[in-house]
Image: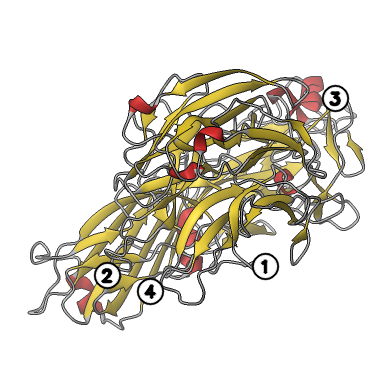
Amino acid sequence: MRGRFAFLGIVSSLGAAMFAYGCGATSSNNGGDGGDAGDWGSTSTSQGGGGGEGGCLFNCGSGGNGGDPNVQALIITPLNPTLNVIDLNKPTQIFTVKTQAGQDVTNLVSWVYERPDIGDMTGATFMPTGNVGGTGVLTAKLSNAVANTNVTVNVKKTVNGAGLDPAQQAAFDNPIGPDPGMSIVYPYHDTVFPLGVLAPEMQWNGASGTEIYRLKITEKHMEYVSYFQTGAPARYLMDQKDWEYIGSSGTGAQSDPIMVQLSRLAPGGGAYAPTSQVWHVAQGRVRGAVYYWELPGACGGNSNGRILKIKPDSATPEEFFNPGGCWGCHSVSRDGKTMMATLDTGSPFPQITVDLTQVPAQYGAIPPGSGLGGTFSAFNHTSDKILVSNDAALNPSNAILRIVNAAGGAVLNSNAMGTGCGEPAWSPDGNKVAAICGLGGGGWVFDASSGYLAAGDVAADGVTVSNVQPIVSQAAGSGRPAYPSFTSDSQYIAFGRPTSGSRSTGNGDLWLVKPDGTELKKLAIASSDNKSFNPVFAPQRAGGYYWLVFISRRDYGNTLVNTNRQQLWMTAIDDPPTAGDPSHPPFYMRGQEGCGLSENAYMAPEPCKEQGETCVTGADCCLGQCVKDPASGAYVCGEPPPPGSCSETGNACTTKADCCNPADECIDGFCAQKPPK
């Protein structure tokens, strides 16, 4: 039996199944269905049938003179109740637990409810938080006997910011006819959001002065209603906490889905019928930060470009490092600790590394004056080698890619993929490199008018590259391929096809292909504006999707209209991407500066944490293990599991066999369950 790994040691435990095996019973056996749930008509508790039998407890035989025949199995009552919370009026549910022989052991059992965001137990009473809806498993345990039941909570919340009386509210339920002019321009219909991002600001056209609206968002276990007033340009931003509660109330890879209805009162009385959309919230959080190059645009100030950092839940960007002048053309190591970037001080442009573990960040092992010059870069999987381009000033056909040591910039391979190659990418597993080769035309590499996407194999030494082959020709579409990016599992490559070199000033769309050139497909939904560029994948999958950040000059609702301004957007890509177009409508990364030009995004994990530092999941830790410290009860980064032990959910793995939970897969190097489709 593999031991479960815990901080500073191995915790060995005898499972309930072993105890039950000795008694001739299973460890847990739920009862039948609990009947129908209550509706939204009132605050209520809907109970199911009688409780189910639990696991074997103490003496499981017929009970001789020395045994206790009254303690055999656990039965929890009621089974599968549903509680309806309306505007924080929270019903509670009292449970009882008895043995199969009828002995009440309610006061002896320990309780665990798996969704503390939905509710928790106080003694034998379940109390919902009133914030999040959904279903969780309630477990009652006494010794090695266990009884389980589902507890479902439905939540309805009303926010009456407009101060409407009941009659005015009721008008929205009896519309007088279709709305004559409202059109929602952001978010897009069928957008997929991950958990933990900033709430989308709804935007619509057709408003005529200050008007009163109702926004109604409905999913399986949550209903959110807001009455508000606004004028033109018409926009509404819900409270961030309410948005997070809506997301956490979802189920499955694409939530339930979420039905969105926006309607307004008519000038002559009554209300128009709602304008409707469908949204989805994937049940996974996108981890990492986006490092992007910002030009001032309409923000004012000087013309210097700077690299900023923004997380999916950031309300504002962070200027983490200031070298005193324009800098850009950056990439970040796989452990999130190091950035390589280029200083705009004249050819050959100095390439530097930046230590992101320092606050503020500092120059790293390759400082200015090291003699290393170039433009673009990509780190290997262990963050100790970098694929670096030369600047090939005014002659892209002379561009070459070198592999250098990240510890100081020493050249390890002076020409990794052949002459005429630039814009590199290195796969997360370390086995492949990709770049745009066959570059031709005048100007800088990003001005090159010709080129094809190529991929090559990296040898075990991490330096030798062989079998460099074209995988997408220039003739396969308009413009040329540009800026490849590998998925987190190294199975696919996203790239752009801009029409002005690799710049974001012309037309452009996004594509996906396997590293061997098969399964080439256009991400037409994500890049429907034909002004999309520079795709880069998030460092981990989440909620059943890959997540792709890219640059677009599309309108942002009615906030940025006809500005033709580059901004950051994010889209979900199906995992696996088997559909003809596996992309989805994108959403705007709200924290960026709308007045600036956001370019050349690169998404990477935050700098990993060392042993003993606090963490949320193994992905936070340099050694991949986030475990509970028995002394403090806090979760901290721990040591790797000893041989023969396993990793808990969220911690590092190499294969599925490394995971303690048999339901887990090894996804992007961490134990996790694939969401249902």
In front: label 3 or label 4: 4
User: Would you call the spot at circle 4 few (<14 residues within 10 Å), some (14-19), or many (20 or more)?
Assistant: some
- Circle 1 — which element? loop
Mark identifier at residue 150: none
Q: Position of residue 470 (x, y in %)?
A: 48, 21
Q: Quadrant of residue 583?
A: top left
Residue drawn at x 54%, y 58% is 293
Q: Earlier in the sequence, mark 1 or mark 3?
A: 3
In front: label 3 or label 2: 2
Q: Quadrant of the C terminus?
A: top left
Q: Quadrant of residue 94?
A: bottom right
Residue under pointer 1: 322
Residue under pointer 2: 214
Q: Earlier in the sequence, mark 3 or mark 4?
A: 3
Q: Is residue 6 left or right of residue 664?
A: right
Residue drawn at x 76%, y 20% is 460
Q: Earlier in the sequence, mark 1 or mark 2?
A: 2
- Circle 4 — which element? strand
Residue under pointer 3: 64
